[in-house]
Amino acid sequence: MSAIISTNRGKSCSICQEKFRCGDQQVTHVGGESHDGFHKSCLARWLAVNPNCPLDRKSIDPNSLTTRTDSITARLRAALANAAYAACFGIPTAVATAVGAVGSGAVERVIAATAEIAGAAAGRAAGIAAGAAVGGVVVATALIVGMGIAEGAEKGLDWILNRRGVDRVARLNIGIGICAGGLVTVGAVVTGIITTTPLTAIAATGLFGGATAGILSLIRR
């Protein structure tokens, strides 16, 4: 099969018949230097249904349409897109975790304050019960809000990926990136960073998740 090469022969594309404009990429194949060239996009569409040159009927290698530079650029573009998905949609997950962590961390203070206020009026046992009840409400509210944020982010990501036709491997890379960012969030919760500097922890989650998804997308296709 003949490889595709660049040319500047001819005034119009032999497939679409439109004249070449300044900057148009003209191509032909090895052995076809004597006839007019084609738009690269036109030849790509032609080879998708017919493996032979439309003028001399020689067999053309369709893989030679993509140069190494084009291939690298396409992979980088896909990797950056997947990294952006993982970073953007990993952040809501981190926010949800932060809400739960901050809410849970506040429970002890809420219980103590409520118990003190109620205890002063109705005794120690009543104060502890009231504090526990209020604390339970705080925890439940934090969990509900956090789960709502996470579920909304997941549905939003699915909707966007479906609209853009993202394939299974790319979805898996994005999912792994989000999970990797989640590990950063867990570490922030364990160390208490998420309650002291939540914005930093959330940003770190997005960056780490995005970097993981991007690297995986360069390795796995």
Image: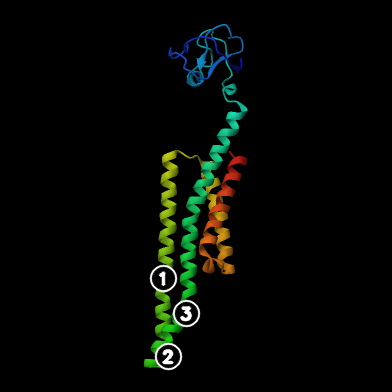
Q: Which residue is mark 1?
A: 140
Discs 3/2, front: 3
x then y, percent, for residue 113: 43, 83
Residue at mark 3? 109
* Quarter occupied by residue 68: top right
Q: Is residue 174 left or right of residue 157?
A: right
User: Where does label 2 land, which residue?
Assistant: 125
Instruction: Name the amino acid type tagged 2.
Output: Ala
Residue shown at 40%/93% (left/top)?
Answer: 123
Q: Disc number at residue 206?
A: none
| Quarter of the image where the N terminus is located | top right
Which residue does the image show at 52% across and 44% down from the upper left? 82
Q: Are marks 3 and 1 in contact (CB under 8 Å)?
A: no
59, above or below 63, in the image: above
Q: Foreground residue, 175 or 41?
A: 41
Relative to 3, residue 195 above or below: below
- Asked whether the beta carbons under mark 3 and mark 2 sit within 8 Å of each other, the answer is no
Q: Residue at x 47, y 67 (%)?
A: 100
